[in-house]
Image (cartoon, rainbow, N blue to C red):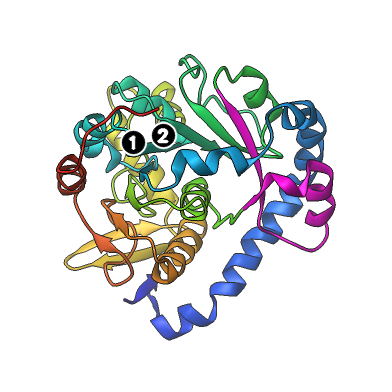
Amino acid sequence: MNFFCGRRVIFARRVTMDKQKLYQQINAGMTQERFHSFERNLSLNKPFITEHGGLRDVIPMLKDRHVVICGAGPSLESAYPYISKLEGRADVAVIAADMAFKPLVRAGIIPHFSVSCETTPRDFFAGEDSSRTMLLAFSCVCSRTVREWKGGLHFYNWLLHGEPYDRLWHEAGTGLGFAATGSVVTSQALSIALGCGAATVMLAGNDLGFFDRCYARGTVRDRGLYPRCSRTAPLESREFSASWNARHYVIPRGDRKFFTNHQFLAAKYWMEETISKSPVPVYDASDPGCAAGTVEKLSMKRYAEMIQSRRKGVWQ
């Protein structure tokens, strides 16, 4: 698959050579911009970390279960009816990216887990009942998110080593467990699901690319466009403008083309590489999502049919 940046073609060989550089640039930029927030949040989160602990207790909750990871891409909307059919089964666990939590709940779906690594205050969960969902939180996540969360809570560190990270993990506690960052929260959810021994994993709404809009309706990012809408600039126009301004690359898929940005591109590479090495079957219903040659593309409807053909039960 070739990627285009403006008029210049970046061939697959060149892209492969630059993957590590792309990861390093994103991690370095993240550290420079947010490290002070990391330290402050960790200091405020430590009493909660001591009380609730890390991922050890999460392992039996995900082991041998079929895990549906929900990102906040527009394609998530078409998956609602099928996720709804699966969420009550004993052998299924639904994990929502923090930004996907609100639209899922408003669609009548209560995720079993949500994952958040956002270090600054965002209203990903505000106004919704979080008491029936367990939050898997980065140890340096925004402290307001931790304080306001009503459900279960467990923490993890990032799988980044060397200074200044090692000092942070030592303070948080290395026994929490580690999740690879992969540059976006859905990749951290994937890392946790695979590390906990999931039976299968389905990626829904993990679009990692966009055309006319970047996010599902009802997300914080989407609702942030509402105040700027008017009769002459409706929501659809604002959404398209936001996606157009965010484009860094173009991903061609057959006769369709999607935009993506540096962070999504890095996540796409990381996920494709991770999935290709995983013994756990991973499926992708996202659009465009990961490339078909690296993951089995499967509709959410077909995945639900596969799971529903198995023994039923109630999630504990």
Q: Is residue 92 left or right of residue 266?
A: left
Residue 18 occupies quadrant: bottom right
Asked if 228 appears above or below 274 in the picture, the reply is: above
Q: Which mark is residue 216?
A: 1
In front of the other: 268 or 213: 268
Asked if 167 appears above or below 100 in the picture, the reply is: below
Residue drawn at point x = 70 percent, y = 28 percent: 143
As helix, strand or loop, the secondary structure at mark 2 comes to: helix
Residue at which label 2 appears:
100
Residue drawn at point x = 21 percent, y = 55 percent: 298
As helix, strand or loop, the secondary structure at mark 1 comes to: loop
**Can you tell which of label 1 and label 2 is closer to the viewer?**
2
User: Is any part of residue 92 visible from this angle?
Assistant: yes
Placement of the N terminus among the 4 image quadrants:
bottom left
In front of the other: 238 or 135: 135
Q: Is residue 214 left or right of residue 168?
A: left
In front of the other: 231 or 34: 34
Q: Position of residue 220 (x, y in %)?
A: 46, 29
Q: Are marks 1 and 2 in contact (CB under 8 Å)?
A: yes
User: Is any part of residue 98 visible from this angle?
Assistant: no
Total numbered labels placed on residues in the image: 2
Residue 144 occupies quadrant: top right
Q: Is residue 70 left or right of residue 167?
A: left
Q: Position of residue 257 (x, y in %)?
A: 26, 62
Q: Position of residue 193 (x, y in %)?
A: 46, 49
Three-letter amino acid code at disc 1? Ala
Q: CA distance from mark 1 to mark 2?
A: 8 Å
Three-letter amino acid code at disc 2? Ala
Residue drawn at point x = 26 percent, y = 30 percent: 313
Q: Which residues are magenta?
A: 152-178
Q: Position of residue 56 (x, y in %)?
A: 61, 43
Q: Is residue 176 left or right of residue 162?
A: left
